Amino acid sequence: MSTTQSTQPDVNGPEDADLKRVLGPKLLLLFIVGDILGAGVYAVTGKLAGQVGGIAWLPFLVAFAVATVTAFSYLELVTKYPQAAGAALYTHKAFGIHFVTFLVAFTVVCSGITSASTSSNLLAANLLIGFGNEDPSSATTLVTALVFMLVLAAINLRGVGESVKFNVLLTLVEMTALAIVIGIGIWVIGRGDGDLSRITVFESPDDKGLFMAVTIATAIAFFSMVGFEDSVNMVEETQDPMKIFPRTMLTGLGIAVVIYMLVAISVVAVIPAGDIAKPTNAEAGILLDVVKTGAPDLPIDRLFPFLTVFAVANTALINMLMASRLIYGMAQQDVLPRSLGKVLPGRRSPWTAIVFTTLLALALITVVSLDAENSVVAALSGTTALLLLAVFTIVNIACLILRRDPTPEGAFRAPSFLPVVGAICCAYLLGPWARLEADMIQYKIAGGLLAVGVVLWALTWVTNRGVRAKKTGFRDIDHLE
């Protein structure tokens, strides 16, 4: 094993200012767990509980099942093709259509940006509350969110090694915050003030049946289960990925769903049924209300907003890290403008891609904050889930198609029926029947972001054809990053 690791080359060789391998199994596990546990549980728990009542744990469980089925497809593909391109690589190998490959890659980028933007708004609301502003204005929250994105860009510019090490600290903090919520839930139940019988009670505010209500709640909860796919885009920065990835990814998913279900049970036990869907501050999330209601005589409620800040900052960091590296890779392949592929010589971080993704996130936060009639966090978190459900549908299909390629010795292989189940479930959760009327803005946001990508592709196509007299397409999809 030591020989394998010592002989692994840098991504593009010592001559190029590029990326380097820094992730071992522990850092990778913290990367996955930290990304999954970040903003998701803070952003969506109250809303999904408002759709199904006391069985709020069930949508988390269903979302976990769908995510895990898709994770099996990712594991088969990443051990068969251990390159950093992720979903774009699998799409290209399965279908061989350059523009489709680009759309998938840019959709992944957009999902990272919408996820980070969700985190920034959640962070801003909690930070302001932590400093004593219990009811911050939308303008104040917006400015704080924008400043946070700029700070995040500065951290990202330091490079992947520093960013992932920072992730370790943030992951430990966010696990502490969720442990506090679970501990308060256990304490409230133990002293007799919490009603555990609520966790079997189904309630729908719109008189929907159990199946449709759980479908809507699962689409909401899906945002909380994403994150494992980001690790695939870091494969070329991971040591011995064929051995590390399967057990680490599945372990991370398992840890996340156990924590989520305990958090959901704590929320239902502590917060009165009629108040779950209406947190004190919709942007800050319902978990802060759990702390205030369950432990009113303890000063935890003054500390908890700051713990939330660290937790959601972790999600934003990882997502912007991934998005910038995919933009960098596409620029290197001449499917996006070459100017987006420049790297800092000293820090070896893709600075122009970081600037581009940060500017796109700033614009997105501003537009949605000014135009959204409902919660900004709800709109952006739902858009993230929508984008990734589309990607996951394609990845599951690609897994089936790529069974035609020989499987390397020692590579992971998913049971044959799982990619079929994953494709059907992900495609089903994409539909408008899995969303409330107020959530239809998610389709508009997703369409607008993808339109930006198509315009950039068209500009690159014109430049390549008119100036360089060459076709636009991925030259080396195996090394997109």
Image (spheres, rainbow, N blue to C red):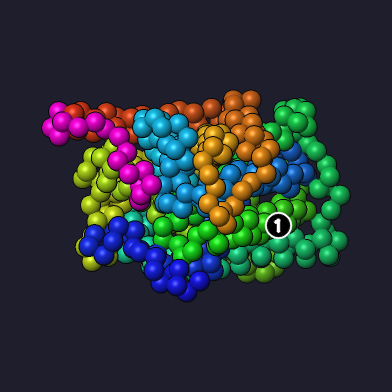
Who's the residue at 39% across and 54% down the image?
Answer: 321
Residue 478 visible to the viewer = yes
Who's the residue at 78% across and 65% down the image?
Answer: 187
Residue 40 visible to the viewer = no
Where 317 sits versus 190, above or below?
above
- Residue range of the region highlighted in magenta in the rendering: 466-481
What's under tag 1, amino acid-wise?
A: Val
Which residue extends farthest left? Answer: 467
Q: Nearer the viewer, residue 284 or 196?
A: 196
Neighbours of disc 1 within 10 Å: few (<14), some (14-19), many (20+): some
127 relative position to 265: left or right: left
Residue 446 position by quadrant: top left
Q: Nearer the viewer, residue 33 or 147?
A: 33
Where 151 sits versus 360, above or below?
below
Residue 393 position by quadrant: top right
Q: Position of residue 257 (x, y in %)?
A: 68, 54
Q: Nearer the viewer, residue 200 or 6?
A: 6
Write down the residue under mark 1.
258
**Total tally of numbered discs in the picture:** 1
Who's the residue at 22% across and 43% down the image?
Answer: 338
Q: Position of residue 394 (x, y in %)?
A: 52, 34
Which residue extends farthest bottom? Answer: 2
Q: Nearer the viewer, residue 97 or 175?
A: 97
Q: Position of residue 50 (x, y in %)?
A: 69, 39
197 relative position to 9: left or right: right
Mark 1: secondary structure: helix
Q: Position of residue 478 (x, y in %)?
A: 38, 47
Who's the residue at 15% across and 31% down the image?
Answer: 469
Q: Is residue 11 magenta?
A: no
Q: Main secondary structure of the magenta part?
A: loop
